[in-house]
Image: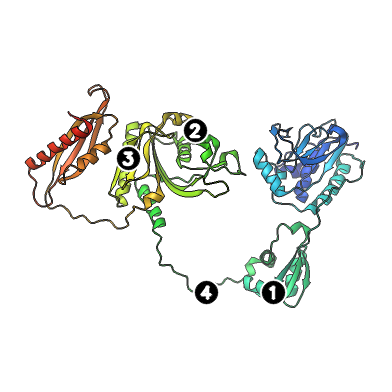
Amino acid sequence: SGVKVEPSPLWMQARLISAGIRPINNLVDITNYILLEFGQPMHVFDYDKLKGQEIVVRMAEKNENILALDGKSYQLSATNLVIADGAGPVAVAGVMGGELSAVSADTKTIVFESANFNHVSVRRTGRTLNLHSESSNLFEKSLAPEGTYPALMRAIELAMELASAKVSSEIFDANNAKPSKETIVLNEKKVADVLGVSLEAGKITHILKSLGFEVTEGKDNLKVDMPWWRVNDIEGDHDLIEEIARIYGYHKLPSVLPAGTIPVSYEVNNYFSDMDKVKDILAGFGFSENYNYSFISEKLVKNCGLDLEAHVKISNPLTSDFEYMRTMLAPGMLQSVADNENLFESINIFELSKTYLKEEENQLPVEINHLNITIATNDQEKAFFELKGVAEALLQKLNIQAYEIKVEEGNSVWGRGQMTELVILGKVIGQIGMVNQEILHLFGIKKSVAMAELDFEALSEFINPNPVYIPIAKFPGIELDLSVEVNTKTSYGEIAMAVREVNSLIEEVNFLSEYRGDKVTEGTKGLAIRITYKDKEKTLKLEEAQAVHEKVVAQLKKLYNIKVR
């Protein structure tokens, strides 16, 4: 009681500032000074602001609120431990005090609190409220209960010295933690084996005692009792050996090369080598590899139009930005484009990483590697066809021949009618398409974005490590162009697939151009392709190529009702 609230003396302010803490007043500065000096967080309450002049430690009631010292109001839940008075919470236990019970210039009587809180409870509360402080950072590391009493004594001493305070009550001690005394058996031979140098038992004992340990020497072993301030730090004899090495001096330990032969494994894991191969190929195409977090925010999930319930929610996320496990790589890639689009004219990036699919309750999610290839540019048509070409070139490099690209209706990430599926031997590997304009707007992206999201687990089943040798043709081929009008819903891939099936003389079908405008019938588009005809047994005559060419036209008219331009 009888405290005088005023600025701290210059020496204390200087020490706090040098440690990165802003001086406030002598009482608050005392608690911050002790936090640095003893490693024990403390709090000071204005006694006259405590309703009923009482302090109760309890769990918060549902939907209780507290105005914290950072000026923000926080809604509490039944899992949050609080310090309360007769009316409600006045501090979030181990995290931060409340504004309504804080010391002010008019304060005359104070209550010092020196407490110890469960580290898991403090960590969970801090994550839930997204509220952190110097105190919570220490409590999360698990402090020893024995540290509360000396810190309180030091606070009383400084309050009497710096604030003219007088002790007006006894100490109220609600200690229910039994002092923990743990003993570790340390073998002298193990110390020598680990450090590579033989130390006498007396030397080991001297080092440990100098650090506050109690040591009892035996025949070949030492019984070591830990001081209370190291109980949560020392877990076994390996920690004691590290302490011995630290004090003895790392520079005194001998440097010896490891003996024996290095084990060599001749087993080749094709899966991981395939991952490296894909990354090398895409890097060779001029793409940069992305490394995004596996955790994403609720905002990213909703911005992509994905189902929030299908995502695994983290029970104790680091922040609200890392609350869910991703089911696709697309959210992180779109965020990367949004962060970088103003720095580059075009963006070519890829990521090959894990995604996490929700399983039944209390089951770990299924981890599946996905490959995402993204192109962001100002030219929408160029972006899609460039990405499609990159995907096809990648398949060729991986020696995958039997694939097709089918047009499908767009889902939440891809715009309606702007998505194709990559299919290999009847199995859907993933999607290639233009990202929905509404989604781009939510991310603040102004460029057009083409994206491929492929299931790498499925893709890897078809990768052939050995390319198939095809000899150079002995006889020349004949190239004939075909320009047609076809329904806008019919893709080039469907046309090319139908053309290849007409005759064995058709060796190659290549895309030339696509036209949409007033020069074609409404609802149709102009499509130009180049067909290469070749006979492996002889030189093909123009008349033979033209005969097959007419069959191609007839087949396309039958299947897609085309009109030759």
Residue 475: give x, y in percent of width and height. Answer: 11, 50
Q: Which residue is drawn at 19% across and 33% down?
A: 558
Q: What residue type is labelled 4?
A: Ala
What's the CA distance linking mark 4 and mark 3?
53 Å
Residue that label 3 marks: 388
Mark drawn on residue 259: 4
Residue that label 2 marks: 303
Circle 1 SS class: helix
Q: What residue type is labelled 1?
A: Glu
Q: Which residue is drawn at 58% across and 48% down?
A: 362
What's the CA distance linking mark 1 and mark 4?
23 Å
Q: Which amino acid does label 3 sit on?
A: Lys
Say which quarter of the image contains residue 105. top right
Q: Which of marks 4 and 3 is in front?
A: 3
Q: Do the residues labelled 1 and 4 touch (CB within 8 Å)?
A: no
Q: Which of marks 1 and 4 is nearer the N terminus?
A: 1
**Left or right, residue 157 beside residue 398:** right
Residue that label 1 marks: 188
